[in-house]
Image (spheres, rainbow, N blue to C red):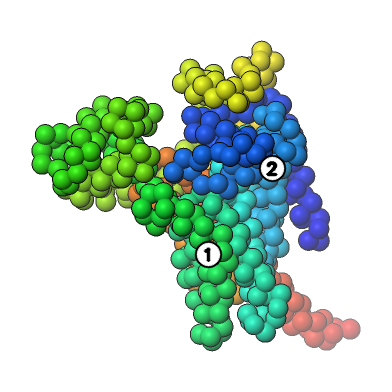
Amino acid sequence: MDRLALLLVVLVAAALRLAFLDRAPLFIRPDSVPYFQAGYELAYGLGPDLQLHRAAGYPLFLAGTIRLLGEDLRSIAIAQHVLGVLTAALAYLLGREVFGRLAGLGAGLLVALSAPLLIHEHSLMAETYFTFLLLLAFLLLARGLRRGPVGAHRRASLHVLGAGLVLGLAFQTRPVGLVVLPALWVGLLVQPGGWRRRLGQIGLLSVGFLGLAGPLFALNQTRAGEAGPALGTFLYDRVARHDTPPALPRASSPAPTTDPRQVAARRTLIKLVERKASRKIVDRDLRQKLGLSEAEANRAMREVALEVIWYQPEWYLRRTLENVGGILLGEVEPLQFHATSRDRRDVRDAWLAQPRIAHLLEPTTDDQRRELPAAEALARVFQPAQHRVLLGVAIALGLAWCLARSAYRLSLALALAALALVVAGAALVGDVPRYRYPADPLLAVLAGGGVGTTLALGGARLGRLWRGRAALALPRAMRYT
């Protein structure tokens, strides 16, 4: 039965993606260019210089895809759609581990049919690879907990350690993965068993995570003078592009630093924030005109953004809560926006400015434009935002079962991880819907668990009542025989 359910999920996911694959070119956004350039240079051993706020995990995935399937951009779409099918399968397996087979089937189908996940698999962005790694880490952890206490069974220890390693790789893909680690700690702390067992699990998970995440911390320590990835670019986007603060400091006001280069950068940045200038213009003005290094430019952006936030914390907190609500509620993902991004002038100019990869960008063909309505129809099969009420009720049921029964306690970590990803995106950048999509499979597992467990337990209870009534009716019938 398990194999049939898993096969159904895989077939549904694969059929949708095969129908979608050739009806649109790979979607490209401005952030896609440095990702692909780094992956291309890694594939051919050219020694890429990654930007400070870009981790190496996704470029490594692109490099492997280029080496295996070729440098045609269609190969990236194929590889990411394969990851999408595997993610749907992982959602089934995780749902089955945490809640049961019926819950797994519901979670797998929700992920298989999700339009936002389908569209972003067709985009040259890191979300798909990051989401796959996130689900794999949770599945390894769930299987490690199922197999027995850490230390008593070698395989259990390896699963928990493997979960930490995969989560570290997810962090190397998108540094926001760091916020998932505390969620897993909480999930382990509420598991049944003694403190020694639970602390051992947390220790193994953390060792695995640091084994792959530690090098990125060390790299940023040497490059930026800080322990984590650069936050300046994200916070700049928050106060300049995604949220409008009620007030800004004047460029001529006293600066909180005496470093003349940082004073000049602050003055320039305040003017750029007023203009809501793009990151490209910021990079030009800070690095080319003022001669700042990448780390110095990031520090300047971070300090100005924090100065804006510090003097109006009520605005920042209120807007962050509103952003969290907006991201969780979601919106219908428009295929047209992604389909036309490839032909935008700024995207094409940024891509063609890189001579090593310029030959790979081809304009959208007439056949692909004719197929766009069919692609849009496929993307309308299941838009989660159109069913947010039903999904919200299902997720609430999943959390209720988590609190009611100790067997489902790992689902608390799913909920905390999903919330942490959303809050981090809302706090650092703003109301950007795609920051919820890596959390969608986790929410799908909760929704599947809520509905599946309710139906399974309700059906079992009805079965017991029916058998009890039948047993009572049998002696009565025997009186007349």
Find residue 210 and name its label: 1
Q: Secondary structure at mark 1?
A: helix
Mark 1 nearby-residue class (10 Å; few <14, some 14–19, many ≥20): some
Q: Is residue 423 above or below residue 80?
A: below
- Residue 230 appears in the rendering: yes
Residue 289, percent from left and from top? 30, 27
Instruction: Identify the amino acid type marked 2.
Output: Gly
Image side of residue 104 versus residue 327, left or right = right
Residue pictured at 67% horizontal, 19% vertical: 368
In percent of the image, x 41 and y 55: which residue is there? Answer: 221
Based on the displayed image, in which of its 4 quarters is residue 15 positioned? top right
Residue 167 place in picture, x, y as percent: 57, 59
> Residue 161 shows which numbered tag?
none
Q: Is residue 430 visible?
A: no
Asked which secondary structure carries label 2, the reply is helix
Q: Residue at x 62, y 70 (%)?
A: 160
Q: Position of residue 422 (x, y in %)?
A: 43, 51
Q: Which residue is mark 2?
A: 64
Residue 227 lies, in percent from the top left, at: 39, 57
Looking at the picture, tell me which residue is in the foreground, 199 or 282: 282
